[in-house]
Image: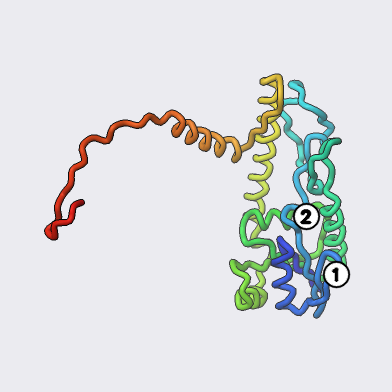
Amino acid sequence: MKTIIAEKPSVAREIARIVGATKREEGYFSGNGYAVTWAYGHLVQLTMPEGYGIHGFAREHLPILPDTFTLQPRHTKTEKGYKPEPSVVTQIRIVGKLFEESEQIVVATDAGREGELIFRYLYSYLNCRTPFVRLWISSLTDKAIREGLRHLEEGNRYDRLYHAAKARSEADWLVGINATQAMTIAAGRGTYSLGRVQTPTLAMVCARYWEHKRFTPEPSGRCIYLRTAQGNRR
């Protein structure tokens, strides 16, 4: 059996139709020697500080620099802190079983840095050793999917793409976790969320807001009309 893993259920459904995996199972489609499953985006993420034994915001903890980053199922915030999402844990279990039973994995996550990271993090978290190849397509037309399946590429061809994505992911973690805790501790009240992307984006939005807020209308001066050869005014 071969397992194809897509990034979203809708993409998995289209690929499953093409390869003849028409039987709906829990968390995947099966048939014609294939299992076609999906990842719901990031099923696995970098472990939060609690996973390294760091609880709460404290000045003496900073900076938080894990010797080695570890992975965990995607968490969601609850009244009792961050907890693994039950649907995510279930899907990871399903995908892990399919990977283990397969002779080959076909990676069909989105063609890009983030899509590569989604699969590699999951593959690493499951400690999987099943060989994998890459389906690299930019559209979901029947023609594009069939063409891509005829020209599957070796998975290690995309190692550098994965390393770039992994470096960005870890940089986001380091900036976001440390900046958020440092700003929150310095402020002394409330929680202030900072991040590599969200903070400069928010700064641009705020700058534009104040630009409009402080705008002072000014007279535009006399209007000058020019007549065309046809006598129309401009």
Query: Is residue 51 something one can see in this rendering?
Result: no
In depth, the one of 91 and 220 nearer the eye is 220
Compared with residue 52, is residue 7 higher up or lower down, i.e. above or below?
Answer: below
Q: Secondary structure at mark 2?
A: helix
Expressed as whole percent of the image width and height from the top left, the position of residue 128 reads 82, 59
Q: Which residue is mark 2?
A: 122
Residue 102 shows up from this direction: yes
Crowd around label 2: few <14 · some 14–19 · many ≥20 (10 Å): many
Report the mark closest to the observer, 2 or 1.
1
Q: Quadrant of residue 59?
A: top right
State which quadrant residue 156 falls in: bottom right
The vertical placement of 108 against 234, above or below, is below
In the rendered image of this protein, does residue 146 appear above or below residue 161? below
Q: Secondary structure at mark 1?
A: strand
**Residue kind at label 1, given as amino acid type:** Glu
List x then y, in percent, for residue 24.
Answer: 83, 72
Look at mark 1 in the image and give the residue it sits on: 25
Residue drawn where x is 76% and y is 59% of the image: 39
Residue at 73% x, 57% y is 119
Indicate the amino acid at tag 2.
Answer: Leu
